[in-house]
Structure formats: structure tokens, C-alpha cells
Image (spheres, grey):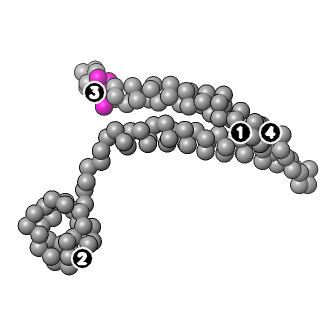
Amino acid sequence: MLKDFKDFLFRGNLIELAVAIVIGLAFAAVVTALVEDLITPLIAAIIGQPDFSDLTFTVNDSVFRYGDFLNALITFVLVAAAIYFLVVVPIKRLVPGKQETRPCPDCLSEIPVGARRCAFCGEVSMTSSP
């Protein structure tokens, strides 16, 4: 039983997952600092109000603090944009994607690269390259 537990702990996937979580948390701290320390003050310089947490309205003595929601929404959009433009776009340029489909020469529908016959029109293609 202890041997199985040891095998579980030292399985490659578990260790890779732990490393990915630690690196992800560190990266999240960097992106959050970027948004809070650079991008949000830039927006504040343009708009004039960096913090919306004081924005509220009242209905029947109930206070709705929609400013906090706006702050969270803006932070989420800025973090997502920072991750997309600083991580996803550069990685897409560095790692070419594997082509999984190609157009049929007869009907131009998308068929798998390895297909010899189009499922839509029945065109026979002896080559499996695009």
C-alpha cells in the first residue's frame, strides 16, 4: 500500500502538474502587478478615475456596490488581454500548428489530411498531402 502511494506521488504527471501550478501562480502575480501598477494607472491618467469601488446606488435601503463589480471586471479583462498579447500570441508565432484538415479538390469542404476519399462528394484523392 505504501509502495502504491509512493508510486502515485512520484508519477511524472503529478510532479509536472505541481510545477505548472507553482509557475502559474508566480506568473499570475507578475500579470496582476503589471495590470495594477502599469495598466490601471495609465487608464486612470486617460479617464481620470482609477478606482470605481465608491460607485453605488440604493433601492429601498439596499446599497448596490456596482463599482466593486466594475473594478473586478476591468481587472479580469486587463489580465486576460495581458496574457493573450504577452503569452499566447508570441507562443503561436514560435510553435507552428499541425495541419489536421485540407480542402477537398472537388467541393472544397474540409477533410482530414489522411483521407483518400471526401465524405461529402466522394472525390477520390490518391495523395494525402494538402
Q: Nearer the viewer, mark 2 or mark 3?
A: 2
- In percent of the image, x 67 and y 43: which residue is there? 74
Image disc number at residue 43:
1
Q: Position of residue 21 (x, y in %)?
A: 44, 29
**Up/down of 102 relative to 70, above or below:** below
Query: Quick one: SS at disc 2?
Result: loop
Q: Are marks 4 and 1 in contact (CB under 8 Å)?
A: no
The residue wearing badge 3 is 11
Q: Earlier in the sequence, mark 2 or mark 3?
A: 3
Label 1 to label 2: alpha-carbon separation:
50 Å
Q: Considering the image in quadrants, where does the N terminus appear?
A: top left
Label 4 to label 2: alpha-carbon separation:
56 Å
Q: Nearer the viewer, mark 3 or mark 4?
A: 4
- In percent of the image, x 55 and y 27: which residue is there? 30
Q: Position of residue 37 (x, y in %)?
A: 66, 28
Q: Residues within 10 Å of mark 2 (few under 14, many from 20)?
A: few
Label 2 to label 3: alpha-carbon separation:
48 Å
Amino acid found under the numbered disc labelled 4: Gln
Q: Earlier in the sequence, mark 4 or mark 1?
A: 1
16 or 125, nearer to the observer: 125
| Camera sees residue 53 | no
The residue wearing badge 2 is 107
Q: Considering the image in quadrants, where does the C terminus appear?
A: bottom left
Magenta part of the chain: 8-13
